[in-house]
Image: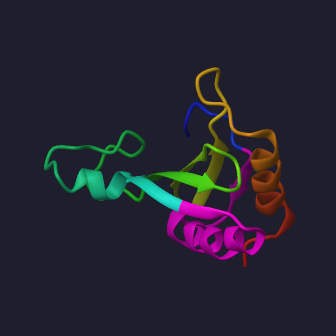
Amino acid sequence: MNALPPILTLKASCDKSLSWLKERLPTVGLRLVQTFDLQAARLTSEDCPCPHHGTSQCDCQMLVLLVYGSAAEPATLIMHGNDGQTWLSLVNTITQHPDPLLRSTIEQVLQGVPLE
């Protein structure tokens, strides 16, 4: 798992979790922009073993997503998954602190509706 504490754990793949996010976030006026995909990045390297499984045929995934609302700056959402589970974490550090209203809205969306 990643070093950021998860705000939600889903029993679904990253792909399914991402589809769910893409459906849910716009319903509350949020826009999602994907900026990184681990599996796509791994395609550029033949010798890139999975840090979790140690094989080239892993199902590990990490996505970096920017979530835009009415705040001046987006919030950064990290999705990390493997073995049919996905952990979602909001970046909240000294150098990157999301707007409190944006953070609250994201957390409500993530925790308010189960993944189907």
Please state if 24 lies on the left or on the right of 65 as rendered. Answer: right
Q: What is the quadrant of residue 86 in the picture?
A: bottom right
Q: Quadrant of the C terminus?
A: bottom right
Q: Quadrant of the N terminus?
A: top right
Identity of the residue drawn at 60% across and 72% down = 22
Identity of the residue drawn at 86% across and 64% down = 112
Q: What is the quadrant of residue 29 in the picture?
A: bottom right
Residue 44 or residue 23, whichever sits in front: 23
Residue 54 or residue 23, whichever sits in front: 23
Residue 43 lies, in percent from the top left, at 21, 57
Identity of the residue drawn at 15% across and 44% down = 47
Identity of the residue drawn at 55% across and 37% down = 2
Residue 40 lies, in percent from the top left, at 29, 58
Residue 48 or residue 83, whichever sits in front: 48
Q: How is the image coloured?
A: rainbow
Residue 38 lies, in percent from the top left, at 36, 51
Most extreme residue toward the top is 94
Most extreme residue toward the left is 46
Please state if 64 lies on the left or on the right of 98 as rendered. Answer: left
Q: What is the quadrant of residue 69 in the picture?
A: bottom right
Q: Which residues are magenta?
A: 7-32
Query: Is residue 27 on the magenta stretch?
Result: yes
Residue 72 lies, in percent from the top left, at 64, 44
